[in-house]
Amino acid sequence: QQQVKQSPQSLIVQKGGIPIINCAYENTAFDYFPWYQQFPGKGPALLIAIRPDVSEKKEGRFTISFNKSAKQFSLHIMDSQPGDSATYFCAASGREYGNKLVFGAGTILRVKS
Amino acid sequence: KAGVTQTPRYLIKTRGQQVTLSCSPISGHRSVSWYQQTPGQGLQFLFEYFSETQRNKGNFPGRFSGRQFSNSRSEMNVSTLELGDSALYLCASSLSGTSYNEQFFGPGTRLTVL
């Protein structure tokens, strides 16, 4: 019940395409869902986060869609660029977990120029 | 503002040895969390410290321990190293202990156990 399932494992898109990464969770105590981006040799960096009281959140070219009833959320990257090539992780947490994040397995994204 | 720093960046040890990793959080941040990242298990939560107290602990054996000092700097220790402990160990800091604060990750310490 602590798991967050992420798909796909890897993704290749052309420049300008819209890669979509999906995550699903079971624990209804989760109420905070961040997405992290990680480049080789670096630690993960927060991209965007959402709470279950909204169904969508946009920040620049990054959009999170959230479906509370299905317990699923996804990341869309608009107008993807080669510089977006990285590993993306979804995560989940909740008030009772403090700062503990449960991460998905990660998606390796490659944007071809 | 300086980011999260971790030392050392790379470490090679042999089985049975012990190791201590250090993390300096962003100035003013009181919460420090540690994660282990491996290709097989992904990112897994080790423990979190807030104001020198361990608030939360993941499912790791007792060989993994940590502490936090009054200046919020944190150390984690792994005793009796095993080959499977080879991983990238990441430290993350945040302002407070609630789940809605952004966590800032350091670059990690790459531990190799031979």
Image (cartoon, coloured by chain):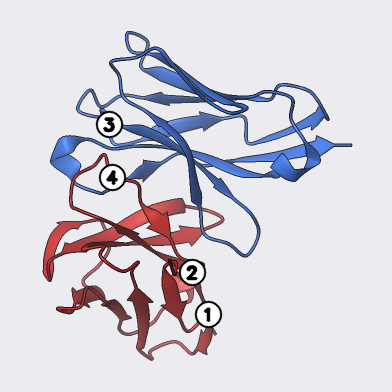
Chain colours: A blue, B red
Q: Earlier in the sequence, mark 4 or mark 1?
A: 1
Q: Nearer the viewer, residue B17 or B100?
A: B100
Q: Chain of mark 1?
A: B
- Circle 3: residue type: Gln
What residue is at 39 percent from the left and 12 percent from the top?
A: A55
Residue A64 to residue B99: above or below: above
Identify the residue under disc 1.
B9
Q: Position of residue B33 (x, y in %)?
A: 29, 61
Q: Same chain for the residues at labels 4 and 1, yes or no?
A: yes
Marks 2 and 1, how far apart at CA: 6 Å
Calculate the distance from the C-alpha at mark 4 to the C-alpha at mark 1: 26 Å
Quarter the N terminus of chain B occupies: bottom left
Q: Is residue B102 left or right of residue B67?
A: right
Mark 4 or mark 2: name the one nearer the start of the chain: 4
Q: CA distance from mark 4 to mark 2?
A: 20 Å
Q: Residue at x 35, y 17 (%)?
A: A71
- Label 2 SS: loop
Mark identifier at residue A1: 3
Q: Secondary structure at mark 3?
A: loop
- Quadrant location of the C terminus of chain B? bottom right
Q: Nearer the viewer, mark 4 or mark 2?
A: 4
Residue at 74% x, 25% y is A79
Which residue in the protein does label 2 denote?
Answer: B108
Element type at marker 4? loop
